[in-house]
Amino acid sequence: MRLRRRVSPLKLAVLGGVLFMLVLVVLQRDVSGGIQEPWFEDLSNRKERMLELVRGAVNNLAFQIPGQPGTPQLPAGGEVDKNCPSGFYTQAELKPWLERPPEEPHSQGAGGSAFQKDNLTPDEKKEKEEGMTRHCFNQFASDRISLHRSLGEDTRPPECVERKFRRCPPLPTTSVIIVFHNEAWSTLLRTVYSVLHTAPAILLREIILVDDASTAGGCGVYQERR
């Protein structure tokens, strides 16, 4: 019996990329060799524009990595632009809009712990079942967990936690857009507070909530249970 060798998707992707680049090189040589067909020239121009975009993206990433090629240097002669200070952002400069309030260690969900509640009353069981039906997750638990809860220790790799960012050129500001549809209000509000508790205030321009055709009647007022 003859066995067929399976080619992995990664090898196929690499092979496809190599063939694509070879075709572009051949087309570029044909265009530069005197072929005047408009579609050849258009394809070559598109390739050049794409390569230029890639080079620009790489350069934009490099400026945040100290010591890497392409990192902007201060003007010669020791001149310092007052609008573009030297050095790196400090932790104080990157403080969030809101400091997370102290959390009761034994409260439900504190530090990323699981929500535990046994012996539910009939009304609580009904509320839990309705939340599961409406949102396909445990809204009953979400409504009883603090909007400001912490998820415990920082799990990012050390190189991410210790990374520094140059003040010049400055980091861009950003808008956070949250799209929701018939969302449980406790989870939606917790998402907003998560942004306020983590995003640097000097970089956070706005939080935009977009209601994507919700049909649930009335938003009501969420009252956090403590």
Image: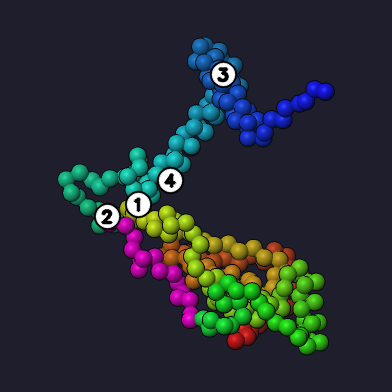
Q: Looking at the rendering, which quadrant does residue 17 occupy?
A: top right
What secondary structure is marked by label 2? Answer: loop
The answer for how far apart the CA atoms under marks 3 and 4 are is 30 Å
Q: Mark 2 or mark 4, which has the lower sequence index?
A: 4
Q: Mark 2 or mark 1, which has the lower sequence index?
A: 2
Q: Which residue is mark 3?
A: 27
Compared with 36, 173 (above or below) is below
Q: Residues within 10 Å of mark 4 (few under 14, many from 20)?
A: few
What amino acid type should be assigned to the residue bearing mark 1?
A: Pro
Q: Which residue is mark 1?
A: 169
Q: Residues within 10 Å of mark 3 (few under 14, many from 20)?
A: some
What amino acid type should be assigned to the residue bearing mark 2?
A: Ser
What amino acid type should be assigned to the residue bearing mark 3?
A: Leu
Q: Which residue is mark 4?
A: 61
> Is residue 33 left or right of 136 when viewed as pictured?
left
What secondary structure is marked by label 4? Answer: helix
Whole-percent x, y for residue 146 in the image: 59, 79
**Of 165 and 5, the residue lying toward us:** 5
Confirm whether the magenta stretch covers residue 98: yes
Q: Which residue is mark 2?
A: 86
Confirm whether the magenta stretch covers residue 6: no
Q: Mark 4 or mark 1, which has the lower sequence index?
A: 4
* Mark in front: 2 vs 3: 2
Q: Mark 3 or mark 1, which has the lower sequence index?
A: 3
The answer for how far apart the CA atoms under marks 2 and 4 are is 18 Å
Please give the range of residues in magenta: 85-102
What secondary structure is marked by label 1? Answer: loop
